[in-house]
Image (spheres, helix red, strand yellow):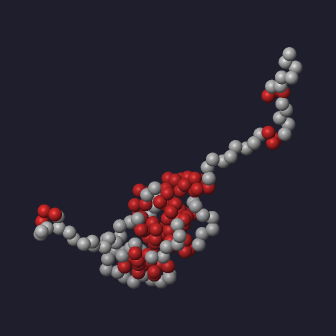
Amino acid sequence: MYDNYLSDASLSSESDSDDEDEPDIYDERDQEYWNIEAFLEEYGPPPGIAYVTKLGVVALYGCATDPVRKDIASVVPLQHVNTWESYWSCTAAAPTTKRAFSHDEWDNMGRWAMQLCECCMEHLTMIQIRSCMIRLLSYGRFIRPPAGRAVLPRTLRRR
């Protein structure tokens, strides 16, 4: 009556092709996000950019991987731009009247930005590290936004 009945136990598992590997449900970007999270837990940012701890992992990923940005003057005031340029050209910084980042501070920020970039990319260039630094600095409030047009409240306007 049950002569033709075959159970799974009767099948042999001699071939490895029966055991298919499950597809990996996480992609490379997920791993890079986890790398950034682990990096943030282990290494805090230097004091000059301490505010980046409030940024999300996706924003930090963008700082590291977005297209190259070179407009340092649009994110920090002139005294910072001067020390930035002297730092990258390896010359002595001109004395400034206002507080500006020192070469050591730029170096600490650059080292931290490099480690952040290493969470997402294998082969780094100095241009990518500079771009990451500019993007990180763009989240700070170093430059006041341009003044808009002043408008009187409606109750004070002439008709």
In the image, residue 151 lies at what x, y percent?
Answer: 20, 69
From this view, report whether residue 125 is shown above or below residue 86: above
In the image, residue 128 lies at what x, y percent?
Answer: 55, 71
Q: Residue at x 34, y 74 (%)?
A: 99
Q: Nearer the viewer, residue 73 or 154?
A: 154
Residue 93 visible to the viewer: yes
Q: Nearer the viewer, residue 14 or 5?
A: 5
Q: Is residue 80 left or right of residue 89?
A: left
Q: Residue at x 45, y 76 (%)?
A: 71
Q: Nearer the viewer, residue 156 or 24?
A: 156
In the image, residue 122 lies at what x, y percent?
Answer: 63, 64
From this view, report whether residue 53 is shown above or below residue 20: below
Residue 110 visible to the viewer: no
Q: Can you tell which quarter of the image residue 65 is in?
A: bottom right
Q: Can you tell which quarter of the image residue 21 is in?
A: top right
From this view, report whether residue 34 is shown above or below residue 46: above
Report the quarter where the N terminus lies: top right
Q: Is residue 75 left or right of residue 1?
A: left
Q: Is residue 17 left or right of residue 22?
A: right
Q: Residue at x 53, y 70 (%)?
A: 67
Q: Can you tell which quarter of the image residue 123 is in?
A: bottom right
Residue ranking furthest to the right: 3
From this view, report whether residue 33 is shown above or below residue 118: above
